Structure formats: C-alpha cells, structure tokens
Amino acid sequence: MEVEQLACMLRERILPEPHHFVLKGDGEYHLQNGSRLCVHAPEEACSEAVRLLGKYWGITADITREACVAEVSGEAYRIDITPNCLTIEAATIAGLRHAFRTLRMLVEPERGTRQLSGTWILPEVTIEDAPALAFRGLHLCVFPENRFEDLAKKVHYAAYLKFNVIVMEFWGTFPFESHPELCWEGVPGTREQWAELIREMRESEGVTLVPQFNVLGHAPNSRGGTAQHVVLNRHPELEPLFEPDGWCWCLTNPHTRKLLDEAVCELHDFFGRPPYFHIGCDEADSVGLCSECRKHPIADLICNHITHFRDLFAARGARVIMWHDMLLNRSDKRWEHYCAMGRDYQHLENLHKHIPHDTIIADWEYGYRFDQIPGEVTYPTTLFFKANGFDTLVCPWRKLDVIRSLGALARREKLFGMLETTWHIFYGPEMKRMFYETAQAAWGITHGEEFHQTTMDRAWRTVVKDLGLQNYNDLGVSDCQIIPQTFGSLG
Ligand SMILES: [Zn+2]
C-alpha cells in the first residue's frame, strides 16, 4: 500500500480526525506491560495515565514524566510514537485524555494470535491535535420511553468522541424529591444511577453534564401534539400554576415561581452545581395570556422571569443558557427563513436589550426553510446575538449540511460554541451521523465528509464493552436490527 494511502487510512480510524497526522516510517511500538511511556504533562497526569492504561488495555507501563512544553496548551495534545517510546504531550488532563482516546482508536491488537495477547501495536506516527471550539455540546432528551442504559451509552459515546458538555433535558423524567408531581412513574434511571453517571463524567471523562428545565413554555414536559401533561394529567388541581392552555407557566403566580425555584435548584445541586443551567424558553406561544398576566406587558413578564433565574444561578456561580427564538419577532423580514417565534402582539422585539447580557443564547437553526433562501445561508439571527454582545451557541439538528455550516460559522465568528440537538432522533444510523458530523465540526475538521460507519461502530462497541452491557437490545445503536412485526395467523 502507498504510504500516503496508509497514512490516510490510519488517520481515519480516529474520531474526530486529528489535524496533523504524519506516518514517519514502518516501525511499530508495542504497547504492553513494561512499555516505555514518556508523558510531558502536569504532575497529576501520571496517575491519570496509569488509570487509563489499566482501563483501556489492562497494562502497567514504565512511565517517566517531564514538564509540559509551551506550544501545547488548553485541550491540545501531541503524540509521538517510535519503536522504542510512546511520548504524549499535554498541558491539561483534558488534553491527556484526548490523547489516550486517540491512541485507543488507533491501536490494534497483536496479529496472528487467536485471543488478545496483552500486546497492542501502534504505528510510527506523529499526531498534533486541538479542538476548534471550547464548548462542544450535545443536547440529549430523557423521555419516559428511553432506557437508562441507552442514555448512558450515548453520554459515554459523546465523551469518547471528545464532546465536553452534555445538556440533559428531562421530559417529566427526573425523579425530583422536592416536586414528585413533575415526574411520571416508571422513568428511566434511579437517582443513584444518574448521580453515578454525572460523577463519572465529571471526574473520569472531563465532561460536564448540564441540566435543563423549561421555565417558560413546554410546561407539559411532553412532546407537543401528544396532549400528555406531566402535572395536569394527574394533578388537575394545580391548574392555576399554568396559563389556561397548560403550555406555559403562569408568570404572575407566586406559587409557580416557588415551584420553579425549588425544582431548578434541586436539579442544579443534583448535577453538582455545574457552571451552566439551561432554562429552555422556546416556543412559549401562550405566555402571559391569563386574566392576571395580561394586565402586564408580556415583554416585562418574560424579562423579569429570565432576570430572576439569571440572578438565582449567578448566586450559585452558574450562567443560564436559553433558546433564542422568543427574542425574535417572526414577522421581522430580517429573520425570514430562519427561526423566530415571537408574535407581533407580544412585542418582544426589544426584549434582548433588557435581559441580562451574560445570558448564553442557544440559537437553534435547523434549516427547515433554507431551500427557499436565494444565495448563501448567512445565519443573520446568530450574527444578531453576537453583535448585541451575547455569548452565542449554534444549535443544529439532523441536517448534516447545517451541522457543517453552523460549525464553520462558530469557528469563523469565534462564537461561544456548538450545541447539537438530538430530540427524538436518538437511535440508529441517523444518530451516528449527527454525532459524527458534530464532532468533526467542533474539532474543526472540514475535509472528512465521508462517513466511516465501521469506525464509528468500533467506537460504539468500545463504549458498550466499558459499560459491561450484555443484553442483545442494549448492544446496538438501535434496540434491534429490524422492527419486529406480528403477522398474525398464517393458517
Ligand atoms: Zn398567567
């Protein structure tokens, strides 16, 4: 095989692909008990390297540590492999972990044996790599229909693909102690399971799990169209907490504010007080319409509400993230073909001037109407929030060209980061493509648009193995390979 072809093939084993990958020769490094490993990294990196060598390959290496070099900073890492030594350079534990994930994807077991021999082969390469975006996020939903094992797999998979923030939105599925009425029966995961996942991500993977609770609309905590309502179906006596249609919380009711405060504080505490909290705030069509709320301008009610939660979380050392769409008027021609949900009668066009400017704006643009745009897709909504001084996250969904172009926008405009939403596209090949494209975009890889399914599947099996999953329905990216059908009697 041509050297260039071989280098390309080896590089494509790594997800996302590293920026700089050079095959130096045809020598091999044997990763096994007693191998030489040189780590140029902070002091605490040694114990992390020992842990990862044990976890990934079950080996103990001969590690020497030196101070890290100046050129490698932040989450960047460098790997140099010769037949005699494996050298890893990283200025942070995050960088060291990325290097180990890369090695795990690159490595292959010793050839010619029936079973793993305890020796792994690494090619003679140099790798230099760094993420393009500091905030590389994934938004995952927890529906009553999900199983905890499924969610845990996806969280671990995202960590392996070098995401570093995961926003968890519970759809009536978080087992609140303060407000059990906010949770359906038989939900996925116990408090203990969630706490363990959050802790493991924080301590062992460097991934921050961020809770979301919708404090404005989406109050049923159920998908629009199903008519299910986590509170009102079982507690109709609590109707005054909501606007008359049940979709939005009633912003003038002090009992609503008290419930929301207790719920969001419990969630934030449960997640270990992370530096962000997502307050939702999208698609709040019926906000401010009850007989008490409509005595006030809707913009004032929403501004007061957002400012309240901003202050609440600021006192806890955290920033709020909110969806952008209620801050833009849908009839405004500037946002034509893009996402804006404010209605004329709500007069929300100046709301962005009054909400606290350290609110992080999550601009979800899914490309629903991009085919009608003459010329380039320019993302005027995102640029608007940036121009108004907001830290802004780009949030694509399932359209792969939108994931790529929003990633490019975030990199070019030096935005706050990227938050890929998944909603109910939670299974199968489409989910894999969304994870893959976002990981590539957030890392700044623009050339590798070919999808390497078997590489993604190898990474998936690695995660499944780590989790110790054994049951057939837990092993794949979908529960099963075909949708089971009942044909009834054939006689
Ligand atoms: Zn009201």
Image (cartoon, helix red, strand yellow):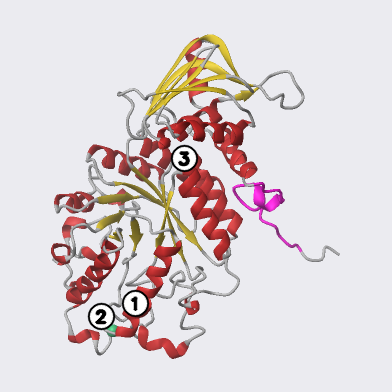
N-terminal of the two: label 3 or label 2? 2
Q: Which residues are magenta?
A: 468-487
Numbered circles on residues, count: 3
N-terminal of the two: label 1 or label 2? 1
Amino acid type, residue under disc 2 in the picture: Gly
Q: Is mark 1 within 8 Å of ligand 1?
A: yes
Amino acid type, residue under disc 3 in the picture: Tyr
Q: Left or right: where does residue 376 sit relative to residue 419? A: left
Task: Pinpoint residue 367: horizontal percent, then vertical percent.
Answer: 33, 51
Report the predominant secondary structure element of the magenta stretch.
loop
In the rendered image, the vertical position of residue 119 relative to residue 3, given as above or below: below
Identify the element where label 1 is drawn: loop
Cα distance between the residues tagged 3 and 1: 35 Å
Q: Is mark 2 within 8 Å of ligand 1?
A: yes
In the drawing, what numbered circle is on residue 248? 1
Amino acid type, residue under disc 1 in the picture: Cys
Name the residue beneath numbered marker 3. Answer: 436
Instruction: Determine if the magenta segment contains residue 158.
Output: no
Task: Pinpoint residue 276: horizontal percent, then vertical percent.
Answer: 34, 56
Cα distance between the residues tagged 3 and 2: 41 Å
- Contact? badges 3 and 1 (CB < 8 Å): no
In the rendered image, the vertical position of residue 9 relative to residue 154, given as above or below: above
Name the residue beneath numbered marker 2. Answer: 288
N-terminal of the two: label 3 or label 1? 1
